[in-house]
Amino acid sequence: DGQLVVPVDFAIRRPDPKGPGAPCHTKLDLVQGMLDACLTTLHHRGLRLPPPVVVADSWFSDSKWMQQVATRHQGTLLVEGKSPYVFLLPEGRRVTGHDLVHRPDWPWRNSPWEPRVRYARLTATSPTYGVVTVVIVDEPGQDRYYLFCRATSMSAPCLLRRWRRRTWIEFVFRTLKHLLATEACQAHSEDAYYGHFVLRLMASFVLFYTSRVIYKG
């Protein structure tokens, strides 16, 4: 549909570690810099895309980053919610993330694209994030979970469809993590780490391309 979807999933050590290793970027600074560089590169290549949708795990649910994605790029940060999060529903009732996933009487609807997948879309207010859109997802064989982002007019099926793209990272980097022994890479400089990271990206390109040729063949 022409929209840029940016899946984010990586590990980062503490910005100011004790012992060996120099101070590094914070999580917020690093992911914001990566997103800015990606969008700037696409812009310089003449691509004019709608505002991006960034999809990430629950540990990326930083209110500052959610605000930055919205104000700097007019985009949406869609993340998985946690059980302790608190929301205030329009009728004034206070619920937690645990309540959202375990309450059975939400206005469930069937996904138009995925058989046996149900969803419920809510608008709520968070003390941390402000007015948000919440999508509760119920699918066979998995624990129920919910996603949220700043209030948006995007439909729940569209949000869920974009969220699914985050799992592409798992298929690629889980294999690369094993084959390239990334856990054993203890780089002591930022340049050394980026060199190893480039090697992983090259390997992922080869893996994707080979898979595409095999499956199309």
Image (cartoon, rainbow, N blue to C red):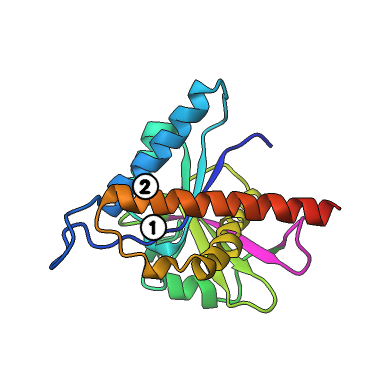
**Residue 53 painted magenta:** no
The amino acid sitting under disc 2 is: Val
Q: What stretch is highlighted in magenta?
A: 110-124
139 on left or right of 216: left
Which quadrant of the view contains residue 186? bottom left
Looking at this view, is 200 or 85 the one in front?
200
Residue annotated with mark 1: 60
Q: What residue did someone put label 2 on?
A: 31
Q: Can residue 108 be seen in this view?
A: no
Residue at 70%, 76% (x, y): give it: 140
Q: Nearer the viewer, mark 1 or mark 2?
A: 2
List x then y, in percent, for residue 196.
41, 54
What is the three-letter code of the residue carrying label 1? Phe
- Which percent across, then down, holds residue 24? 22, 52
Examine the rendered structure and indicate whether residue 32 appears above or below residue 124.
above
Q: Residue sitting at 54 percent across and 63 percent down?
A: 176
Compared with 74, 213 (above or below) is below
Residue 78 or 212: which is nearer the viewer?
Answer: 212
Q: How far apart are marks 1 and 2 (CA)?
A: 9 Å
- Give the structural element (helix, strand or loop) at label 2: helix
| Residue 171 image-quadrant placement | bottom right
Residue at image x 38%, y 57%? Answer: 61
Above or below 2: residue 209:
below
Q: Do the residues labelled 1 and 2 touch (CB within 8 Å)?
A: yes
* Label 2 neighbour load within 10 Å: few <14, some 14-19, many 20+: some
Q: Residues within 10 Å of mark 1 (few under 14, many from 20)?
A: many
The x and y percentages for residue 1 are 69, 37
187 left or right of 201 in image: left
